[in-house]
Image (cartoon, rainbow, N blue to C red):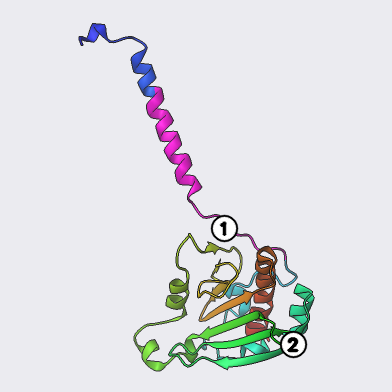
């Protein structure tokens, strides 16, 4: 086809189609980005390194996670009566310490499970080879498909939903401590809100008591 035979309306139409394609691409790309979950207001406020102890230089001493949350704090938050809590020191090189808060009735599933890992508590060979809670946190943050970032708590935090998988629960990385808290009330929206509040209580008690 000779140039003079090209319809005058064709070039503007092609330009319009090209721009529409670019806009559609950018829109779809934006949909794929994960949204940050915003923490609900708390009387404690966000826990950040500078607000803990800016002069702190010593590693955080490992501490029983059952001393970081009180049963009545969980009961007040969830409106669920609890039974006894139990402590477990996992037999693994990262030395996970686990406190499980059970329901009041025998056979009830765990209502809250608090896991804490300290750099200082890990096996020496891990620390000597550069492994830290940062690597543990990254390994549990499997993908945007399963986890979502949570704003304004610790150095980094993400939510992995309710359930029993490794990535489930609220995961918080703060300085040389990794904290994971699973809340299973039967309402995932309520679980996230409660996990954020309880994590703040535990971190405040760990670093400021």
Which residues are drawn in magenta? 16-41
| Element carrying mark 2 | strand
| Element carrying mark 1 | loop
x then y, percent, for residue 199: 64, 75
In-image side of 44 versus 30 (left or right):
right
27 in the magenta segment: yes
Q: Residue at x 78, y 83 (%)?
A: 72
Q: Which residue is mark 2?
A: 83
Location of residue 126 with respect to 164 vertically, above or below:
below
Q: Residue at x 40, y 34 (%)?
A: 22
Depth order, front residue of 165/92: 165
**In the picture, residue 172 is in which quadrant?**
bottom right
Q: Which residue is mark 1?
A: 36
Q: Nearer the viewer, mark 2 or mark 1?
A: 2
**In the picture, residue 107 is in which quadrant?**
bottom right
- Residue 193 in sight from this viewpoint: yes
Q: Residues within 10 Å of mark 1 (few under 14, many from 20)?
A: few
Q: Residue at x 43, y 73 (%)?
A: 139
The N terminus: image quadrant: top left
Depth order, front residue of 61/84: 84
Location of residue 119 with respect to 197 vertically, above or below:
below
């Amino acid at each position: 086809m000779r140039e003079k035979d090209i319809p005058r309306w064709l070039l503007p139409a092609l330009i319009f189609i090209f721009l529409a394609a670019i806009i559609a691409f950018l829109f779809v790309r934006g949909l794929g980005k994960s949204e940050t979950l915003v923490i609900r207001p708390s009387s404690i406020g966000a826990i950040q390194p500078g607000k803990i102890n800016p002069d702190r230089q010593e590693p955080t001493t490992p501490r029983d996670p059952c001393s970081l949350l009180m049963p009545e704090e969980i009961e007040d938050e969830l409106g669920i009566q609890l039974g006894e809590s139990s402590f477990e020191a996992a037999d693994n090189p990262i030395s996970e310490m686990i406190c499980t808060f059970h329901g009041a009735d025998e056979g009830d599933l765990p209502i809250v499970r608090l896991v804490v890992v300290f750099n200082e508590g890990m096996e020496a060979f891990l620390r000597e080879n550069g492994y830290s809670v940062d690597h543990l946190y990254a390994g549990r943050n499997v993908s945007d498909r399963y986890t979502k970032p949570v704003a304004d708590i610790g150095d980094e935090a993400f939510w992995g939903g309710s359930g029993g998988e490794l990535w489930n629960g609220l995961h918080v990385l703060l300085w040389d401590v990794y904290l994971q808290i699973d809340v299973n009330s039967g309402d995932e929206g309520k679980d996230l809100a409660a996990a954020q509040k309880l994590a703040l209580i535990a971190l405040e008690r760990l670093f400021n008591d």
